[in-house]
Image (cartoon, rainbow, N blue to C red):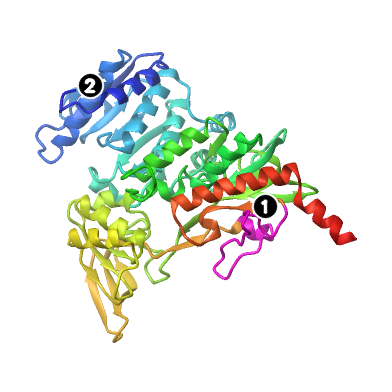
Amino acid sequence: MKKDVLLPPEARKILKQDFSQLEQPVNVFIFVDEENKENRPFGEFAVKFLGELAEITDKIRPVVEKITGEVAAKYGVSRASVILIEPEKYHIRLIGAPGGEEAHTLIVALLMASTGRTILSEESRKRLNELNESRDIKVFVSPTCPYCPHQAATAIAAAVEKPGMVRAEIIEIFENKDLATQYNAFSVPQTFIDDHLVGLGLQPQEVVIEELLSAAPVKPKAAEYGEKIEKDLVIMGAGPAGLTAAIYAERSGLKSVVLEKANIGGQVSITPVVENYPGFTRIAGKTLMDMMAQQAITYTDIHEGEEVLDIRHTDDTYEVTTDRTKYIAKAILIATGADSKKLGVPGEAEFFGRGVSYCASCDGYFFKDGKKVIVVGGGNTAATEAIYLKNIGVDVTIVHRRDALRCEQALRQSIEDSKIPVIWNTIVREIRGEKLVNSVVLENTGDGSLSTLPVDGVFVAIGYVPNNETAIKLGVEVDSQGYVKVDDRHRTSVKGVYAAGDITGGFKQIVTAVGQGAVAANSIFEDITNPYWIEAEAEAKT
């Protein structure tokens, strides 16, 4: 294989199989600016990438145009690099080269444009058909954001379903800093409809469709459902614990479904590099979770973007209502993990998405040309985030409240080798800025002195808080920090409810979550087959 080839043989083999689904030829216009030295590499990448896709199938037909030409004027293109997909029929624009995760967005867009079939559910399509006025939807993305392709694909699907009514633009923030600055979009994905912000982060497709109809933010709500779906087990969460539990449950004969309101993989999918999972010396977190998901999906259904809105205990079953349907299950496994803990200081909420972030792999790309940021924290996550940011070209400093990092020795060594400075015995008291973050107020924990540090971004990595809303609603016992209490079989205090992974606290590692998921699934199988509580209730009566 030539060194300058972007797609290796294995990738071409997979794409050839995917492209066998293509039906109609897809005309793709790539607009470049050869006079702009800074932008030229992005355009060259886009041209080369589309060219290699066209080598795989004759259904993809790329055309290269200059932004100063008549074609650019016809379609209203005034910047590069811009990709238009079948512009005579649809308004689908990828503003920025399709690198990293956004290559996936491009592939999905090509498939939908060629077939006319989209990723929208039948319910979402019916609801979208009620749209009676045009809408512009913009999704800001980055090549390193694992959440972005899902949000982008929903926007593109709407444009395919309603040509002439929905205009979809997917905007890469680093290559288009002026647009990111104009919309204050520095945390991705961010979604705008008719230039109004409607969503920060990944949203279920049903929510995006409702936002297209209303041109305003909406909250998930229970869908109109028909027949209830019966399962032995409903698993909440598609992280390592939930996916492993699904594999073991189905192999034991239980019928399960995995519900994930965000993206498959949870916190692991946004971990840049995993170096302590057995069998892999070094692997991207998203790659590892994709492999787990691919295995799990051969056994069970995984519903990404489906949020649980309510659970009720009825006799010996649980009634689970989501934003799509309703399930009746014999058991529930809570594997909802934990979310990033907030600093709780002035400016943090105000500047979220405008310089404050909790995900380096999602949002760090914007700062990669030497912008100055701090990472707040001293554990494994903070160290990993700081190393990642340093490696992509960010000027990063760690701020830690103690005099020594709490992370593993290997990470401490990497921090030292990377020459990442650490401000010891210091906490963040305030985050300041105007439209964007421009400084932080720091307090020395020793003498209480205050200082101001100019920064462009603040990445918070100070630990996690459990996603325990469902557990609390079910009356499950939790500890003082809100983590679900379980026994050695991962049973909770409520009959038929189990928990595994980060939601149970303790040693938060991928390998731990995987082991807990397997144990929980085995317990559920045994308890459904031979309910332990029947014997216990009989003994209580005697």
The question of residue 396 being in magenta is answered with: no
- At 33% from the left edge and 43% from the top edge, which residue is drawn? 283
Quarter holding residue 46: top left
Any mark on residue 497, and which? 1
| Residue 172: percent from left, percent from top | 29, 41
Any mark on residue 51, and which? 2
Mark 1 element type: strand
Q: Magenta span covers which residues?
A: 470-495
Q: In this view, does 91 lie above or below 115?
A: below
Residue closest to the far bottom: 447
Does residue 196 appear to the left or right of 513 in the view shown? Answer: left
- At 67% from the left edge and 46% from the top edge, which residue is drawn? 524
Q: Is residue 288 visible?
A: yes
| Residue 526: percent from left, percent from top | 69, 44
| Residue 236: percent from left, percent from top | 58, 47
Q: Which of 316 and 460 is in front in this view?
A: 316
